[in-house]
Amino acid sequence: MKYARSLVRLRIDERLSALRKRMAEGRDPSAEEDTLQYLLYTVRSTGARRILEIGTGEGVSGAAMLLEAPDAFLVTVEKEEERRRKAEELFDGLGLSGRVHSVLGDAADLLPALETPFDLIFLDGPKAQYLAYLPDLKRLLKKGGVLFADDVFLFGWVSGEVPAPAKRMSIVNKLRGFLEAVSDDPELITCVLDLGDGVSVSVKK
C-alpha cells in the first residue's frame, strides 16, 4: 500500500496545497492525499454537477471538487461557525462563491428538508452520525449517484488494526454499523477501500 500511495500525484491549486499543509500541522487536517485524489477522480469520472458535502471544514475538499468540475454546484453543510467562515473566505478567494451554497447547522436537522437529488455526496462530518444520516443520504442520491464516505476506519479502530479505547467503542460500533449497512443494502453497490483513514464508495442502483 505504501508503494501505491507513493504514486499519488495530487494536482490542486497552490493555495489549496498550502492550506492542506498548514492544516496537517494542526488538529483539523483535511482529507489525506490519496483520499482527495480518489475523490477528485470520482468527481471527474462521474461528471457530477450537483454535489452535497457534509462537513465543510475549512473548504479544501469542496473547493478542490469545484475546481475539478467547472460546471458543478456545491451544497456544503458545516456546524461550526469558525470553520464555515474560513471556508467562505476560501471559496471567495478562489472565485467559487457563485457555485456554493454554504449552510450553517447540524446535518441531522438540515438533511430532511433537502429535496433535489445529488450526483455525488461527500460524507465527512461527525462519524458517529454516518449511520443515522444514511436514509436521507440514500433518498437524496440520484440513481447512478455516488456516496463517498471518508475516515470510515477511524485511526484503524474500526478495522481492528489498532485497539480502540474503551470510551471510543460507541463510535466504532456505529461506524461498523454504517459499513455493514452500505455493504448489505441491495440498492447500493459498495466498495470499502484502504485509502487514507478508510473510505467507502457506494453507487445507487
Image (cartoon, rainbow, N blue to C red):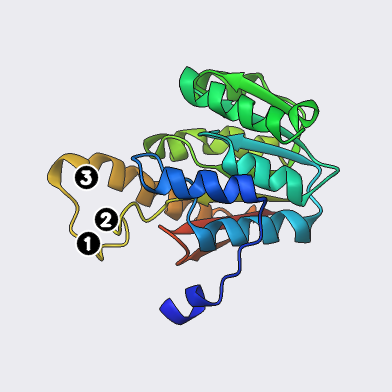
Residue 157, numbered label: 2
Question: The residue tagged with tag 2: helix, strand or loop?
Answer: loop
- Label 1: which residue? 162
Q: Which residue sits at x=29%, y=46%?
A: 173
Q: Which residue sits at x=65%, y=18%?
A: 113
Of pointers 3 and 2, the one earlier in the residue sequence:
2
Question: Is the residue under label 1 in contact with that under label 2 (CB below 8 Å)?
Answer: yes
Above or below, 127 relative to 83 = below
Report whether 73 appears left or right of 38.
right
Residue 37 can be seen, yes or no: yes
Of pointers 2 and 1, the one earlier in the residue sequence:
2
Above or below, 73 relative to 115 = below
- Label 3: which residue? 169
Q: Quadrant of residue 155?
A: bottom left
Q: Residue furthest bottom?
A: 3
In the rendered image, residue 9, in percent from the top left (x then y), is placed at: 60, 69
Q: Which residue sits at x=49%, y=76%?
A: 6
Q: Amino acid at mark 1?
A: Val
Q: CA distance from mark 3 to mark 1?
A: 12 Å
Specify the quadrant that holds the C terminus. bottom right
